[in-house]
């Protein structure tokens, strides 16, 4: 402790002493690259969102102000897609984080080869490419010949095959199951690491106080995991908001619009109808929503630090 | 030492002269040789790649001054990529295209009109209907390569097991419903009817004849076609098919093909090329195949008429091509040369040729089969062309989303029809 005082007291002075003004300009190349690869597309999307611009129409794009945004407010498919995006994103993240937490707590006391084996098995889904996950589940859900229906029929739980991906009410939850299966290992990994970082003294003193299992989890461990849960949750919210591969490979947004999310809708508008103007307007709304989550993430990181 | 230097100098002189001469010769050959870029999905699919490669090799042998650079792009991607390449000023010389995508590309105004390249002999050799379908604003925007209309395929073995007459497939929707009930009862693991109900432009193209046989035209937005009684009758029928387990929703057309080859699909709405796919799966000889499977016109709905769609492939030339004469030569070769017809159109696509008459006796014999005859004599005449273009692509999402809603939910049909109309009108 003797050395701690002088070091912290001198730190600002040392930072000022070592500061070289022109070092700040070294960031310029990075800023230039970011401006080209991120800034330009964002600005161009903003510009396009104010134009009537269809790739099939070779005449120059026409400026139409906020008409694309007006259209967006009266477009039922947009609102439906937004709702589906929220359900898919938050539903998947909440369930996957809870499952990841439970698995992390269950495997916490394992040591040696048992822990290594359990961890390897539990992390396997995370290593499977998303498109492969989508096709695996698509074939597992098949009405004729799908393993899910075959097992449920054999167990007598259903008397006829269920149309998992071809029922408007079941399709979104069915895709979410595939998504949760793929995402849970991420939470398991992060929360296992966070659990391992809880100081032994805290656990020991709780044990001395004869804290029960539930009390230990709820009052001791969960408060330590809050930061990791929040940050990993935000990261996954951002990632799921952009999830295209699983939904497209499994249902292409159908049946009807029951699994159409914002990203699927934008893809259809831009690359099937070639309506880049309107697709850009939806892209801007999508970007704003993502920015809000990104800001929350940065803030959480700062608070955590 | 000086002798060695002299010899080295001489050798260098001879070598550099030889190199210069060979470079000049090579560059003059290169200047004579035209390279055509050909965007196609035939080279992207394992089943057809050997065929297209053989035809290209033969073309290059016959035309040593033309080299073909084949660019493999998947079927589902090709329209997107071609539109983007047209917009960026980098289109290929020639491309393979089909269905609504042909008309989407034409919308860009960057397809070379082909009328001027066809001489009278060629015009007379092609089936008039095959050319008529690709006229946009009075100009020919695409040249027919293969013809692959859809027919109503039936598995005679499955029909027989269900106690049905295998030589008497259903002629009306009512007969079809009765036959499917018998099949479902006798063979619960068989899908009675293979129909593509995915949400994509091709699925609307495939379902268009079924809508037409009920008298429906959902894309007639001005007259509220999606809310018409005919469209509601079609949607109600589709719901009945799903509720009774007669269709397997969500499968693409190609996913039914291996199943019918294994007697797991009784009736299947598919193109002429199905024969080739079935035989590649179950290895049946031609005679066995004709005994086991048949194809006929679509069972007629309330309109009393049967319809079909033409799902063949076309070839387009881009207006920006710097080698239009060579491109036209290549297009003609792929579509009408006896070698290409025998070794690609028939062998790998199992499709019809757009030629009015087979170019040789041997080819005429190969085209004289029960399946090709059924398509040529009965089905081709029922082909109806949907209102292709950008509105078709945009409308396909709305219409097929409605069809999917009808077959997978209990939402009232009136409500679904109104929602399709609303989405189409936007």
Image (spheres, helix red, strand yellow):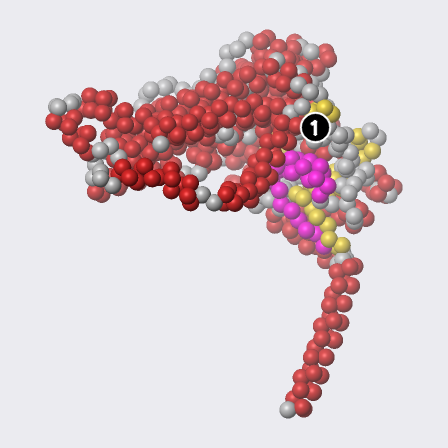
A169 w.r.t. B258: above or below: above
Q: Residue at x 44, y 38 (%)?
A: A129
* Horizontal side, residue A29 vs residue A159: left or right: right
Determine the secondary structure under disc 1. Answer: loop
- Which chain does the numbered disc 1 sit on? A
Q: Is residue B72 magenta?
A: yes
Q: Residue at x 58, y 37 (%)?
A: A35
* Horizontal side, residue B76 vs residue A178: left or right: right
Percent position (x, y) of residue B399?
Answer: 62, 19
Percent position (x, y) of residue A190?
Answer: 33, 34
Q: Determine if residue B409 is in view.
A: yes
B231 w.r.t. A30: above or below: above
The span shown in magenta is: B67-90
Q: Residue at x 47, y 36 (%)?
A: A131
Q: Is A10 in front, or is B23?
A: A10
Q: Is B418 in front, or is A278?
A: A278
Q: Is residue A300 magenta?
A: no
What residue did someone put label 1 on?
Answer: A54
Q: Quadrant of the N terminus of chain A?
A: top left
* Horizontal side, residue B359 vs residue A48: left or right: right
Percent position (x, y) of residue A61?
Answer: 73, 28
Q: Is A28 in front, or is B180?
A: A28
B161 w.r.t. B330: above or below: above
Q: Residue at x 76, y 41 (%)?
A: B318
């Amino acid at each position: 402790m003797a050395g701690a005082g002088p070091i912290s007291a001198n730190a600002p002075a040392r930072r000022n002493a070592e500061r070289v003004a022109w070092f700040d300009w070294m960031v310029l190349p990075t800023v230039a690259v970011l401006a080209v690869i991120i800034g330009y597309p964002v600005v161009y999307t903003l510009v396009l969102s104010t134009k009537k611009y269809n790739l099939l129409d070779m005449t120059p794009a026409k400026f139409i102000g906020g008409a694309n945004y007006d259209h967006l407010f009266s477009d039922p498919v947009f609102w439906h897609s937004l709702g589906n995006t929220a359900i898919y994103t938050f539903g998947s993240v909440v369930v996957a984080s809870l499952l990841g937490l439970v698995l992390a707590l269950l495997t916490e006391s394992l040591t040696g080869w048992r822990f290594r084996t359990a961890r390897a098995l539990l992390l396997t889904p995370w290593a499977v490419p998303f498109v492969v996950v989508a096709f695996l589940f698509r074939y597992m859900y098949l009405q004729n010949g799908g393993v899910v229906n075959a097992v449920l029929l054999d167990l007598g739980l259903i008397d006829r095959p269920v149309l998992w991906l071809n029922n408007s009410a079941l399709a979104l939850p069915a895709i979410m199951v595939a998504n949760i299966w793929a995402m849970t290992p991420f939470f398991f990994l992060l929360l296992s690491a966070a659990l391992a970082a809880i100081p032994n003294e805290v656990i020991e003193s709780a044990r001395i106080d004869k804290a029960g299992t539930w009390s230990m989890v709820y009052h001791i461990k969960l408060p330590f995991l809050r930061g990791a849960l929040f940050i990993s949750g935000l990261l996954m919210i951002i990632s799921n908001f952009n999830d295209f591969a699983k939904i497209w490979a499994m249902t292409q947004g159908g049946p009807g619009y029951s699994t159409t999310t914002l990203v699927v809708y934008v893809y259809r508008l831009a690359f099937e109808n070639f309506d880049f103007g309107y697709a850009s307007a939806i892209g801007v709304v999508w970007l704003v929503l993502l920015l809000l989550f990104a800001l929350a993430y940065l803030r959480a990181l700062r608070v955590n630090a | 030492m000086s002798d060695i230097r002299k010899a080295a100098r001489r050798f260098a002189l001879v070598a550099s002269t030889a190199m210069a001469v060979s470079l000049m010769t090579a560059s003059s050959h290169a200047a004579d040789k035209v390279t055509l870029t050909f965007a196609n999905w035939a080279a992207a699919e394992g089943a057809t790649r050997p065929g297209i490669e053989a035809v290209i090799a033969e073309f290059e042998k016959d035309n040593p001054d033309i080299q073909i650079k084949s660019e493999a792009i998947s079927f589902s991607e090709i329209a997107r990529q071609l539109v983007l390449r047209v917009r960026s000023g980098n289109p290929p010389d020639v491309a393979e295209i089909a269905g609504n995508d042909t008309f989407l590309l034409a919308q860009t105004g960057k397809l070379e009109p082909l009328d001027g390249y066809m001489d009278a002999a060629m015009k007379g050799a092609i089936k008039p209907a095959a050319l008529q379908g690709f006229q946009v604003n009075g100009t020919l925007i695409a040249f027919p390569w293969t013809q692959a209309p859809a027919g109503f395929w039936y598995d005679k073995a499955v029909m027989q097991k269900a106690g049905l007459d295998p030589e008497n497939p259903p002629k009306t929707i009512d007969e079809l419903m009765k036959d499917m009930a018998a099949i479902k009862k006798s063979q619960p693991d068989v899908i009675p009817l293979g129909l593509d109900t995915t949400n994509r432009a091709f699925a609307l193209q495939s379902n268009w004849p079924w809508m037409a046989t009920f008298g429906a035209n959902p894309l007639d937005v001005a007259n509220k076609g999606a809310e018409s009684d005919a469209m509601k009758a079609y949607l109600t029928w589709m719901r009945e098919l799903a509720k009774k387990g007669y269709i397997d929703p969500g499968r693409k057309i190609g996913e039914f093909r291996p199943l019918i080859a294994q007697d797991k699909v009784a009736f299947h709405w598919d193109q002429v090329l199905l024969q080739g796919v079935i035989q590649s799966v179950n290895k049946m000889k031609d005679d066995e195949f004709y005994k086991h499977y048949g194809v006929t016109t679509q069972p007629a709905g309330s309109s009393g008429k049967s319809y079909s769609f033409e799902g063949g492939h076309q070839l387009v030339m881009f207006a920006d091509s710097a080698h239009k004469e060579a491109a036209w030569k290549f297009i003609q070769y792929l579509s009408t040369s006896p070698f290409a017809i025998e070794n690609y159109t028939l062998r790998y696509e199992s499709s019809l040729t757009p030629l009015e008459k087979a170019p040789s006796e041997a080819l005429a014999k190969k085209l004289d089969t029960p399946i090709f005859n059924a398509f040529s004599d009965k089905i081709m005449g029922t082909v109806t062309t949907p209102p292709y273009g950008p509105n078709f692509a945009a409308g396909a999402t709305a219409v097929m989303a409605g069809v999917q809603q009808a077959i997978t939910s209990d939402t009232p049909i009136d409500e679904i029809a109104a929602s399709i109309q609303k989405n189409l009108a936007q």
